[in-house]
Image: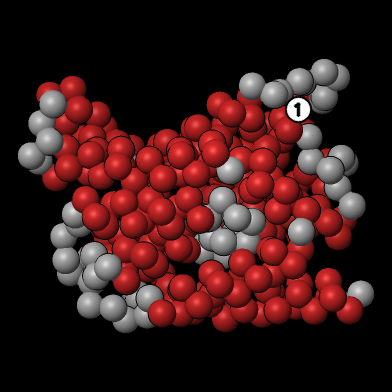
Amino acid sequence: MTLIEILILAVIQGLTEWLPISSSGHLVITQKYLGLDLPLIFSVILHVGTIVVVLVAFRKDIADIVKALVKRDFGTDEGKLALFVAVGSVPIALIGFVFRDFFESLFNNLLVVGSALLITGFVLFFSEKRISNRKMGILDSLLIGLAQAVAIIPGVSRSGVTVATGLLRKIDKATAFKYSFLLSVPAVLGATIMESRELVVGNVDMVPLFLGAIISMIVGFVSLKLLQKIVMREKFHLFAYYCWTVGLAIILLTIYL
């Protein structure tokens, strides 16, 4: 991989990791048409960057959750949120472990990516203008966790389907947004650990990879803050049109070219 290719992928990762348009789907598309084969170390570094962005953006919420866990106080909002994150993490842990090989096989299939983008678009579209003022419960956390597990499929946006599921459950916008990204920490951390077990660094030049990770983090932080404003302004569903356009284009290109 050249430095330019690494930077292109880093910007794409930073933008699409948080916006509800599927980072995995866009990376599959980019790799396919640029003829790239990403080294595992690059994926691991990007995952670490993803965790860093969430830790920085939600540092206060995470600190409050940790304090509640230390005190074993699950009656407060922070304590309940910690419990919800634990419950919501179960589906992706089970499904990801059991069906890991199956999901990995999908990352070379552009038809799957295109179809998944169409599905993401429909989920986003139907989340429009929901009356979102209800407090979150255990069932909500489990359903959002199931949505996150489905998002292992390339083309299904993790942020898109988790936030949308929260909105469809009529959870207030701020809570749905915050929970979605706090829930990503155990999932991304688990994926990073699993990938690191198979990691062989060899003679890989780490400097451009770390540069790509830094750029991805900067772009990702900006896109995360942008998404927060979009969700609060009830414009989240507008990303559906982008997902439909890209998904349909990928399907047609795959079939006819």
Above or below: residue 183 compared with residue 257: above
Q: Residue at x 23, y 35 (%)?
A: 65
Q: Name the image quarter holding the C terminus.
A: bottom right
The spot of residue 130 in percent (x, y) is: 28, 78
Left or right: where does residue 239 sit relative to residue 133?
A: right
- The residue to which callout 1 is attached is 207
The spot of residue 101 in percent (x, y) is: 67, 41
Do we see residue 12 in this rendering? Answer: no
Q: Specify the farthest residue to the left.
A: 75
Above or below: residue 110 compared with residue 248: above
The spot of residue 109 in percent (x, y) is: 76, 59
Name the kind of residue labelled 1 in the image: Val
Q: Residue at x 82, y 24 (%)?
A: 204
Comparing 75 with 34, the one in front is: 75
Do we see residue 10 in this rendering? Answer: yes
Comparing 58 with 200, the one in front is: 200
The spot of residue 43 in percent (x, y) is: 68, 37
Above or below: residue 163 compared with residue 183: below
Callout 1: SS: helix
Q: Residue at x 62, y 61 (%)?
A: 155
